[in-house]
Image: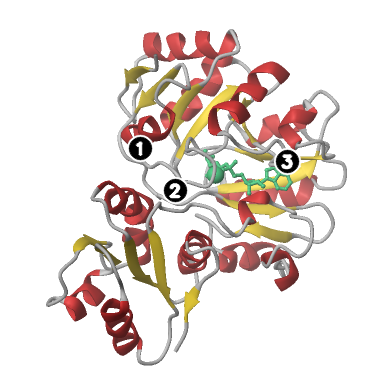
Amino acid sequence: MTKTLTVNPTNPDPATMLEAARIIGRGGLVAFPTETVYGLGANGLDTAAVGRIFAAKMRPSSDPLILHVSSSDDFAQVAVLNGLEGIVSRLAAQFMPGALTLVLPKQARVPLTVTAGGSSVAVRVPNHAVALALIAASGVPIAAPSANLFSRPSPTSASAVLEDLAGRIDAVLDGGETQIGVESTVLSLIGAPTLLRPGGVALEDLEALIGEVLLPNEAVLSERVAQPAPGMLLKHYSPRAKLLLVEHGADLEQRVKSAARGATGKLGLLLPSHSLEWLLEVPAERVDLGATPVQIAARLFAGMRALDAAGCDAILTHQLEGTGLGRALNDRLFRAASGNVIQG
Ligand code: TXA
Ligand code: MG
């Protein structure tokens, strides 16, 4: 049985948070909201508890987890900052708490199950009162991947968590819908700063603060080499329906229309408001993603789940302008489509 603990997202009840923290304390699993997506939390210093996260999600043990802490001052408890204090404190001053995860050399006390056997650890300070209250009440770093079954769209509500994990976890803290809707940006500070996953903090904003950030190369994207960040696996964040992903660019309207004509089976449309207007005559289930990248991010994963629930065989969508938050959105769409992009 998975217990639902309903909390006020901005001012969670201390008694409820204590109940959740007790579950964490005895090695259990509690899903909780962050500003990005819901996380599936366990005591990040307890090897057995962390093992339960992998089992509940059916996640391969080769995928390392993020440790969530209350403040960047706590990074030193789990990471080795030697020589990195300056860059970490500049990033923290601008982006923390927030949707930025840093990969740093790990402290010996961090279990190897957390880091998938590696010598680095990912750390983040979530910008959500419920997540911060859970960390504080538990008194330990909380290891938490997104609270979905492996390779499914990340959950942006407690009901999406339960869709995947009901009966597999002890509790979910229901604090309503998450604000950002895509996961944190993962930035490695091992060697030259490298973007391992685009996310809620834009690459442009990182570069404005710390200078050039390297991008993972094409070989990594196409999985020909070992994964620096398994969130980069090609098939990831996928709906059950086949995603028909049209590349952004010239003649977008014509190409979207022709993809709609070519689709077979029950069709779902997962599109920004203005693109939905191109397909008014097409019989389909519709999800309106809104107008701006911020709105699209907030609705993207829930939209995939809604069209799956409506029984769609195919979901038609298109890529966006690839700057700012659009880079993260295009990344999630590309992976949801297993890299199959419909070109011009
Ligand atoms: O917004 C988020 O980051 C959410 C919320 C719950 O905090 N969490 C999340 O976790 O998205 P997950 O496990 O779904 O994605 C974590 C990403 C993966 O791409 C993983 O490979 C990468 O972070 N990662 C974790 N530890 C790493 C490490 N030591 N080195 C490189 N990449 C790492
Ligand atoms: Mg995930």
CB contact under 8 Å: marks 3 and 1: no
x and y percentages locating residue 6 in the rendered image: 30, 21
Q: How many numbered marks does the figure carry?
A: 3
How far, Cα to Cα, is label 3 from label 1?
Answer: 25 Å
x and y percentages locating residue 118 in the rendered image: 82, 40
CB contact under 8 Å: marks 1 and 2: yes
- In front of the other: 66 or 235: 235
User: Which of the four quarters of the rendered structure image does ligand 1 lie in?
Assistant: top right
Give the number of the disc on residue 62: 3
Considering only order in the chain, which callout, 3 or 2, is on the residue closer to the N terminus?
A: 3
Can you say which quadrant of the picture contains the C terminus? bottom left
Instruction: Mark yes or no: residue 23 visible.
Output: yes
Relative to residue 305, is residue 211 depicted above or below?
below
Can you say which quadrant of the picture contains the N terminus? top left
Query: Which residue is depicted at the point 31% across and 50% down?
Result: 308
What is the secondary structure assignment of the residue under circle 3? Answer: loop
Residue receiving disc 1: 160
x and y percentages locating residue 175 in the rendered image: 33, 30
How far, Cα to Cα, is label 2 from label 3?
Answer: 19 Å
